Image: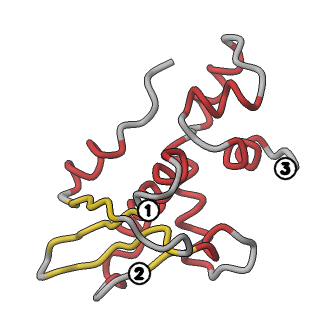
Amino acid sequence: MGMPVKLDEICRRLGMRIVYEDRDTGFAGSIRNVLGDFIVTINALHPTVRQRFTLAHEIAHFIHHRDRIGDGIVDDELMRDGLQNPLERQANKTAADILMPDDDVTAAFESGLTSLEDLARHFKVSKHAMAIRLGMPY
């Protein structure tokens, strides 16, 4: 089992810049294209596990929707509920794949990390995100 995914390294390799700002609680994050530079803004007031999921979500937008980013895609509380549009669902799925790869989750479980709390802590994600990944009701 490796360390949790280093999202800042992924962003660096993709040429994305990360900015952490204190924002109102409804704002999770955004990605925008400023003269060819992709800038991700993350709400610094959110818990670290939430910041990590939001950053992975914005990386997913970059991977799948780079041509649609334009002046920006802003993600808020709605990106986490079941009513979001297909682009948001795809970004959430890819974010989960980035943060909690199936093979790594299986390996962690087989090594003895069998509780939801232990798995979430190991991958530095919320218990809610891990429960969804495991197909468990939460």
- Which of the labelled discs sits on residue 60, or is there none? 1
As helix, strand or loop, the secondary structure at mark 3 comes to: loop
Which amino acid, mark 1?
Ala
Disc 2 crowd rating (10 Å Cα; few below 14, some 14-19, many 20+) is: some
* Mark positioned earlier in the residue sequence (2 or 3): 2
* Comparing labels 3 and 1, the label whose residue is closer to the camera: 3
Residue 5 relative to residue 124: left or right? left
Which residue is the site of mark 3? 138
Residue placed most toward the observer, 112 or 74: 74
Q: Where is residue 65? Give x, y as percent.
A: 40, 75
Alpha-carbon distance for marks 3 and 1?
24 Å
Disc 1 crowd rating (10 Å Cα; few below 14, some 14-19, many 20+) is: many
Alpha-carbon distance for marks 1 and 2?
12 Å
As helix, strand or loop, the secondary structure at mark 2 comes to: strand
* Mark positioned earlier in the residue sequence (1 or 2): 1
Q: Please, which residue is most extreme toward the top here? A: 111
- Which of the labelled discs sits on residue 73, or is there none? 2
